[in-house]
Amino acid sequence: PGQDYGFMANVPWHKHGWLDLRGKYEFKPPKDVTRVLPVVITRDPYGWFHSMCESPYLLNGNWTGENCPNLLDSTRTSVEAKLTLGKRLEHKRVWDSLVHVWSEWYGEYYDTDLPRLIIRFEDVLFHTPEVMDAIRKCAGGVWAKDEFVYQTASSKGGKKYFEDIKPQSSMISAIIKYGQDPTGRRTNNMTNQDLKFARRHLDERLMEAFHYKHPDEM
């Protein structure tokens, strides 16, 4: 009963918000969060570390700059990542590193008993119609049109705020990037200490569940 919100770009507790904010932080309607099925998009953590060099969005930390991602500083201490949400900046969280952000943020969605979908970005990119149809069936939706049409331009196209940060990726540029040498791209600028740190602290349950491999396994 009540208003049907359909597909939303944000969950009510913000798409970058950690799961514990569900029901505590109202970024978007509806207030009844039990009516929302979160669709979480995960991606290869080593590629994600580098994306945080280009567009950290709301995350803050000193991993950017030369030789990004700097998982460890010059003293081999992990570089913290911070996220603050809310009109009064009342929701704050600090992680030990980008590695911990990936493991803990996705791990909380992985471990919860709440209804949710966790989907690999790589599958969305290379198997778009099949993945979208699986989501539709799970959510009980119907297609408005029979023909599937790819959105090849940037999903943020025309939004000057994002374009001022960096040129936005399109579907084609994303496919080209992922089609390049995966090992070299994933480990670019990472020191041996960075790689060992990531190996030690990435959640192996998630790595196995989503079929992601460490560079030394490829």
Image (cartoon, rainbow, N blue to C red):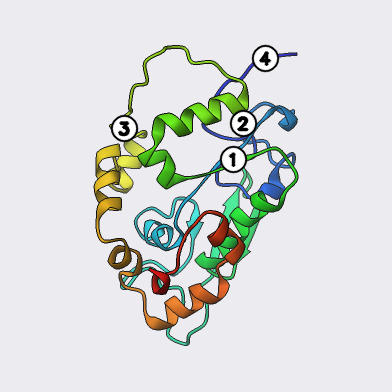
In the rendering, at what x and y percent does residue 134 appear?
53, 30
- Between circles 2 and 4, the one closer to the viewer is 4
Amino acid on which disc 1 is placed: His
The answer for how far apart the CA atoms under marks 2 and 4 are is: 14 Å
- Seen in the picture, residue 150 relative to 21 is either above or below; the reply is above
Cβ–Cβ below 8 Å for labels 2 and 1?
A: yes
Which residue corresponds to the image point at 34% horizontal and 69% vertical from the top-left?
A: 187
Amino acid on which disc 3 is placed: Gly
- Tell me which numbered mark, 1 or 3, is placed earlier along the sequence: 1
The answer for how far apart the CA atoms under marks 1 and 3 are is: 21 Å
In the rendering, at what x and y percent does residue 180 appear?
24, 56
The answer for how far apart the CA atoms under marks 4 and 1 are is: 20 Å
In terms of image quadrants, where is residue 213? bottom left
Element at label 4: loop
- Seen in the picture, residue 177 relative to 137 is either above or below; the reply is below
Residue beneath disc 4: 3
- Residue 28: image tag: 2
Residue beneath disc 1: 14
Residue beneath disc 3: 157
